[in-house]
Image (cartoon, helix red, strand yellow):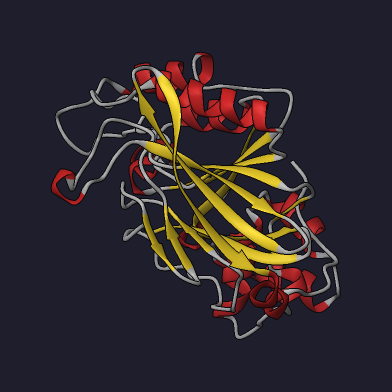
Amino acid sequence: MIYKMNDLNDKLTQYIMKAYKNNVPLKEIEQTVNIAHNTLTAFLGKQGIYLEREYLPSFEIRGNKILIIADTHIGSRKENFSYIDMAYDKGVAEGVKACLHLGDLVQGVYDKYYDDINYQIKALDTRFPSVDEFLTYLILGNHDYSVFESNDEAKYVLENKKGLCPLGYKKVYFNWNNYLFDMIHPVKQLRDELPMVDVALHYIGHGHELRIKTPSKLKTPTLSDDIINQTNGAFPGFLIGTLNEDYLSTDVYYFKKGKVKLKKRNYFTKQMLDIYKVKWYKWMEC
């Protein structure tokens, strides 16, 4: 899979532009050149072609509940698969219809406190949960970049892991019950950007601590023991979002004595959500 626009050589660029001008469907272009939907969208934006809102989402979620996780850092000395397993078990028990992973799936080679890449690849392949009840949509983070851009075996495992749908870097839009959301993880190595449009909520990884900035931004805690700002009350945890006819809520969970505990709830009203409701036509299927 092509993850970044730097990989688009002149010949490939000419093909994409010709196909787009000849009204070839975006999904057909993505499949032909093996490119992530959000990378193609960002590429077209660089050419001055800004797609309508209904063409922005990379995937669609139908159902009332989703699981939101981030920063698992597999291969770090602070990885914690018991957290990951408990989050997925809770998601299954709550009947979620999709999981969002907001990046830094693995530790990569960022510092000396990591196990080698072979361990990280094997752990992803054999220990990261694959459940029948829902897919995990993954946006890759800065730690992932150091692994999946340089290791063919890692790419193969990533793209063939059951239940895991990798979607590229930096930002992905998605349609959840006819509302537009996005998932974000900053990657300084990459310059490609998707267009900025209003969304019901930004789900953001990378920060390792919960921060709720009403009404637009929700920074997600880490699902590892890599707590950066301990003095600020940061904690390992995950989120479950519920989108009903009248409200969007986010339940925040943490771990205590090997069990999952509810920490807080946050609500948005239907009046706020209706601002972002639009019609949809295209999305990617994994």
Question: Where in the figure is residue 55, as x and y percent of width and height?
Answer: 75, 70
Which residue occupies the extreme bottom position in the image?
A: 48
Question: Where in the figure is residue 80, as x and y percent of width and height?
Answer: 35, 22
Q: Is residue 23 left or right of residue 236?
A: right
Question: Where in the figure is residue 210, as x and y percent of width and height?
Answer: 35, 51
Residue drawn at (50%, 71%) of the image: 216
Residue 114's image quarter? top left
Q: Is residue 201 visible?
A: yes
Q: Quadrant of the N terminus?
A: top right
Q: Is residue 154 left or right of residue 118?
A: right
Residue drawn at (57%, 67%) of the image: 10
Residue drawn at (50%, 72%) of the image: 215
Q: Is residue 156 left or right of residue 224?
A: right
The image shows a total of numbered marks equal to 0
The correct choice, above or below, for 5 with respect to 34 in the image is below
Q: Is residue 3 visible?
A: no
Residue drawn at (49%, 22%) of the image: 86
Q: Quadrant of the C terminus?
A: top right
Frontmost residue, 57 versus 61? 61
